[in-house]
Image: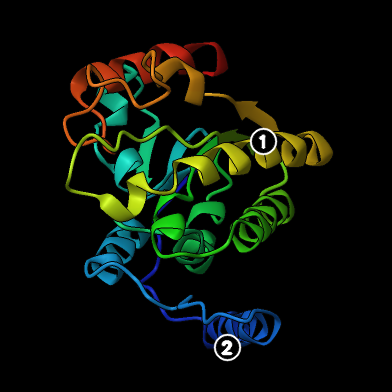
Amino acid sequence: MVRVRDNFKPNIICMMCFVGFNFGIHAQQNTKVDSLRRPSNFEDKVAQFRMFPNDTLDVIFLGNSITAGTQWNELLDMDNAVNRGISGDTTFGVLERLDEITEGRPAKIFILLGINDLARNISNDIILRNYSIIIDRIQKESPSTQIYVQTLLPVNGTFKRFVNHYSKAPLILKINRRLRKMTEQKKVNLIDLYPHFLDENGRLDIQYTNDGLHLTAKGYHLWAILLKPYL
């Protein structure tokens, strides 16, 4: 069933809950977590997403710039592949806009998140807690949706542009291990992308990146091949 959305009206109650969640994190952590920081284009992108029609056959790719960086419908030759990546987004940003994802009750959601959280020094515990909330909400708000959590990709610190991201390579491994356990517990699918993008030195292979963080066309081609069994 296809449904065109009404004009977006902010959910004040939801936002108050989200802010409350933010204060709860502050109370439990010794270091301040800026959970309300968003990319400069966040509001515009979410407003666009809310204008687009929903379909229960949608296959949604949810994430940050790595997800946003390709045309999924063309890459996968699937008319129902929908890009819901926002450059610079975090697990907190996805929690804020998740209702836009679940309201259409899509067939599948592929999630790749966390590297920008790490770059902002958000702890693994908080990132994994946010992942858990995201999964729980999808299962509650769109119970027929199949969820696919993808492991974080490696980075390559031989480049110079994204130093805050490159330095988190050891934490990426820890998050990926915990994502595996979480998906087993919650009975959702895990797609382990990480090892397929490594070079012989354990870094993001330069044939798949030109900045040590984002993917080239060849990188997206590999990703598409890895996704085929799940589509």
Q: Residues within 10 Å of mark 2 (few under 14, many from 20)?
A: few
The location of residue 64, given as percent across then percent down, is 36, 49
User: Taking 8 as reference, is 210 above or below it?
Assistant: above
> Mark 2 belongs to which amino acid?
Met
Residue at figure coordinates x 28%, y 67% from the top left: 39
Label of residue 177 in the image: 1
Label of residue 142 in the image: none
Contact check, label 2 and label 1, Cβ < 8 Å: no
- Residue 105 vs residue 223, the one in the foreground: 223
- First in sequence, mark 2 or 1: give its number: 2
Residue at figure coordinates x 68%, y 60% from the top left: 129
> Mark 1 belongs to which amino acid?
Arg
Residue at figure coordinates x 23%, y 34% from the top left: 158
Residue 130 horizontal side relative to residue 167, left or right:
right
The location of residue 153, given as percent across then percent down, is 43, 33
User: Taking 90 as reference, is 165 above or below it?
Assistant: above
Residue 20 horizontal side relative to residue 161, left or right:
right
- Residue 83 vs residue 163, the one in the foreground: 163
Residue at figure coordinates x 16%, y 30% from the top left: 210
Inspect this view and state whether residue 83 appears. Answer: yes
Residue 160 horizontal side relative to residue 104, left or right:
left
> Does dot 2 land on a helix, a strand or a loop?
helix
> Does dot 1 land on a helix, a strand or a loop?
helix
Whole-Å distance between the Cαs marked 2 and 1? 33 Å
Q: Residues within 10 Å of mark 1 (few under 14, many from 20)?
A: few
The location of residue 1, given as percent across then percent down, is 52, 41
Number of residue marks: 2
The residue to which callout 2 is attached is 16
